[in-house]
Image (cartoon, rainbow, N blue to C red):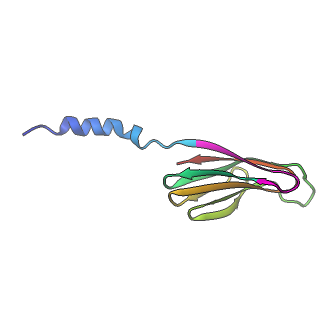
Amino acid sequence: MKPVVPVVVLLLTCLPQIVQARTRTVHATQTATCNRHPAKVAVQGPASVTCVNPTQSLQKPGNPPASCYVTGPGVAQQVPNGGNVEISGAGTVILSCQGSGSLSCSARIED
């Protein structure tokens, strides 16, 4: 009978490299004339999406601050700066910006 302990040790030492998550940043924009340029990225399974630094050119008193809008498997919602949403599974994640005037936003995707 052959010992199985070395195989188990080898698998356990390689496991962290196999399941290591990757992080990507995507960017979206919208012109002042409402021409949207969303960002689209494929994810292979559940993912975490964080809105990063949304900006707008028209900031008026009473207007809400710029934000991200994230759609993907299991989610379609507005996300404030620094906010986070969870994607439920594999599919396409779409980032667009919300606000007034020219817009720019980014999102960090960890899957």
Determine which quarter of the picture holds residue 91.
bottom right
| Number of marks drawn | 0
Left-right relation of 98 to 32: left
Q: Closer to the camera, 35 or 60?
A: 35
Of residues 73 and 37, the one nearer the viewer is 37
Residue reaching furthest to the right: 61
Q: Would residue 20 be counted in the magenta stretch? A: no
Q: Quadrant of residue 18?
A: top left
Question: Residue 35 at what x, y percent from top left?
Answer: 81, 55
**Magenta-highlighted residues:** 24-36
Q: Quadrant of the N terminus?
A: top left
Magenta stretch containing residue 35, yes or no? yes
Q: Seen in the image, is 3 located left or right of residue 36?
A: left
- Residue drawn at (73%, 51%), measured in percent from left and top? 81
Residue shown at 56%/62% (left/top)? Answer: 73
Q: Is residue 84 visible?
A: no
* Residue projecting furthest to the left: 1
Q: Nearer the viewer, residue 7 or 93?
A: 93
Left or right placement of residue 45 versus residue 30 in this view = left
Image: 99 above or below 108:
below
Q: What x and y, as percent, mark residue 37? A: 75, 51
| Residue 89 appears in the figure | yes
At x 90% / y 53%, what residue is drawn?
A: 59
Q: Main secondary structure of the magenta part?
A: strand
For the point 27% across and 35% down, the residue is 10
x%, y% of residue 41?
A: 60, 50
Q: Is residue 13 above or below residue 77?
A: above
- Which of the 4 quarters of the picture holds residue 33? bottom right
